[in-house]
Image (cartoon, helix red, strand yellow):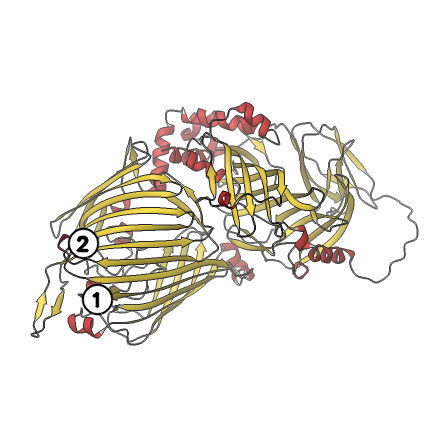
Amino acid sequence: MLFRQRLLIAFLVLLLFPLLGMAQVTKIRGKVTDASTGEAIPFANVFLIGTTIGTTTDFEGEYYFETRVLADSIATTYIGYEKQVKPIRKFQYQEINFGLSSGDFTLQEVVVVAGENPADILFRKVIENKEKNTNKELEAWECEVYNKIQFDANNFGEKIRQRKLFKPFEFIFDYVDTSTVNGKAYLPIFISEAVSNVYYRAQPQSKIEKIKAAKGSGVENPSLAQFMGNLYQEVNVYDNYLELFGKNFISPAANFGSSYYKYYLVDSSFIDGQWCYKLMYKPKRKQELTFTGHMWIHDTTYAIRKVEMDVANDANLNFVTDASLRQEYKQIDGTQWMLVRDYIIADFNVVENNEKLPGFFGQRTSVYSDYILNQPRPDEFYRSPVRVIVEEGSLDYDEEFWQVERPEALSKKELGIYHMIDSIERVPVYRTYVDVVYMLSFGYLPWRKVEFGPLAKIYSYNEVEGHRFRIGGRTSNLFSKNLRLDGHIAYGHKDMRIKYGAGMLYVFNKNPRRAAGMSFKYDIEQLGSSFNAFSEDNIISTLFRRQPSDKLNLVSQFDFYYEHEFFNGYSNRFFLTHRELFPTGSFVMETHQEDGSLLKHNSLITSEIGVDIRYAHRENYVIRDFDRINLGTRYPILNLRYAYGVPGLINGEYEYHRLQGSISQWFNVGNLGWSKYILEGGQVFGTLPFPLLVLHPGNETFIFDEYAFNLMNYYEFISDRYFSFYYTHHFNGLFFNRVPLFRKLKWREVIFAKGLVGTISDANLNLNKLPDVTYMLDKPYFEAGAGIENIFKIIRLDGIWRLSHRDNGNASNFAVFLSLHFDF
């Protein structure tokens, strides 16, 4: 319930218009141009009179900064132009533009000779000294981290504010502020803070974060506090590629940076008593995943002292209009350079450059302090089963504690977020909005301690049941934060049978996860569909079916399972499954007898015990009460399943061993996009009726399923030993970005291929009378396709070719598939 309350708060403020407001800090942004020509003046110095606060304009002549330092005027200077000074308004946002007039200056004689760009020389020094200036050679380090995450609504029209729907929330406009990055007014809607200690050891590599204090607007669940820490957001400017928004950006400090950037030596100055050079950079070519910005380089060690990176304007990103990163480094103990401040802000909008649709800022500030270098702790300290540890009572600290722990004071408007959230929740109509947004997002309609759904399964149609009606529901975390009950009942007007199911899940421990559950169902099932497919009682399957759904079976099944996560990324699932399969409609299960006759089976009964093993190195996720939001890992994910069919156990009729394994990985391919592969293989040991063998997953809908063969029909291929592969590559607009129309529509290219080889033993072949639609895998099966993804950012269209295998009347050789998804 708390989760959907916070979701609604974000939804409401994303439909309201923020007005300009005052802030604790002075915020200034503007542009410096030539007064006579209007051309932008890059590298101009802009500073507050009487202070050391200042900056230089970028390649477009623009500047911005924020400061709490008191000053009453701002000035700009540039060689060949007269200095210009303008007054400022303290503690307000303001835009101050300068038009500089040329001036007369007398310079001493300067001799210019041909030579190498000094900026390139300086950049090479940075690369040559990169290894010793990173922390990768340290044996161990630890530090304290303050982490602040904030989301702000922006980009709204006044008309939305005037709608009656939002009148009860008029008070939130008192909290608006303005961004110096792009001048947009915004409304802070969420803020979280955390203080933690991070411990790193190089060999064997281990990184642990202990969150000792956490605070968030509306965050009362300790399991959510782990996401407020620091481990889930790591950007190292020294890496060749910086992974942002799921894409590989080329770092300005990459070893091959000179192939992608032009560097300019524009300034030098003392920073905390250290002489540094300012190196500005911009991309050499358009439409590449690069940055513009500058970095300050220490003159002795050639370490990066400060760096500012703004995503290039023509970097075609889904939903992201703008993004900026800021990092600062300092020498610890006079030797090792370590990150002391990290800041990132991104501007998200559904449609680029459209000020009529809502958007939001997401920003994170991390401040590192109290470093201890090369003093590793005992080995047992690093053997924690979880990477993020939330200490007991971490959410109980009062404001006095935070005033001491914060390295920077919150602005009045940031502090006001906590009060604003409480005020929104007290508005009577708020509860209705919560339920509507939750229903649209998750497909369940909440009512007190129960949620009715899934709504997409209330009605469906198939050839076996005809019109099917289903009512289901589950308990929410208002009922219990550890126990979830669920159930459903359904009826088909054609077969006139009542189907039903029920289950329970009890979570003993959320991190590491320890849970047990059981379930029972008496319902229809489509054999030979992938685990990722829409079930046959989902309205989506009904609407997008490309074959009649006449291959369904009735199943009576009981499951009991226990999940045990030993440490983050490695888990086991032990299970017991009792299952009775009944043929329905025209489906027949027959086996050959020794006397040559056929035995028609009215049902098949199996009882099996088994274990699932899963390993995903350094996998990240957000923990909720009953499930997790997986944030993925850059390493391969291994899955292994073993099951043993126990004859005689709860009337089980068959003995067999089933072994399956898979490996999958998602990875970036430089700046050429990203790829994913899935390799899977398995074998069934035993002589069994064909429904108990490997029914290779087909797809009889027009919804693309990456875990199925999309031009294969159900039961088309059966084996007892097999190997399959799937590979896809997403180019992220590598080619389409060169075409203006495609670029504007934000179309992306995708290609993929799938293959399958398999055999069936003579014993199983002789036992079974296979369905008429089944064929032998006497040669490999292949599918390949190309697609366009992200039309309007949620649609993908694929053309798929069935490249090889025998033609038959029930199989298509080409089809176009539709996939609805969000790709960030």
Regarding residue 336, the answer to whether it shows in the image is: yes
Query: Which amino acid lies under the numbered mark 2 shown in the image of this protein?
Result: Arg
Query: Which tag, 1 or 2, sits closer to the chain's start?
Result: 2
- Quarter of the rendering containing residue 777: bottom left
- Viewer-proximal residue, 77 or 398? 398
SS label for mark 2 = strand
Q: Residue at x 78, y 56 (%)?
A: 118
Judged by depth in the image, the label closer to the viewer, 1 or 2, is 1
Question: Looking at the rendered structure, which numbered label has been put on residue 686?
Answer: 1
**Would you identify the image quadrant in which residue 371 lies?**
top right
Near mark 2 (Cα within 10 A), the count class, few <14, some 14-19 or many ≥20, is many
As helix, strand or loop, the secondary structure at mark 1 comes to loop
- As shown in the figure, which amino acid type bears the numbered disc 1? Gly
Query: Where residue 678 appears, x then y in whole percent?
Result: 40, 62
Q: From this view, report whether residue 705 is shown above or below residue 563.
A: below
- Position in image of residue 45 (x %, y %): 76, 42
Q: Relative to 164, is 374 above or below?
A: below
Q: 16 or 25, which is in the foreground?
A: 25
Tell me the number on the disc at residue 491.
none
Q: Quadrant of the N terminus?
A: top left
Q: What is the crowding at mark 1: few (fewer than 14 residues within 10 Å), some, or many (at least 20)?
A: some
Q: Is residue 759 left or right of residue 420?
A: left
Mark number, residue 579:
2
* x, y percent for residue 60: 69, 48
- Residue in the image at 47% along x and 44% along y: 387
Asked whether the viewer can see residue 191, the reply is no
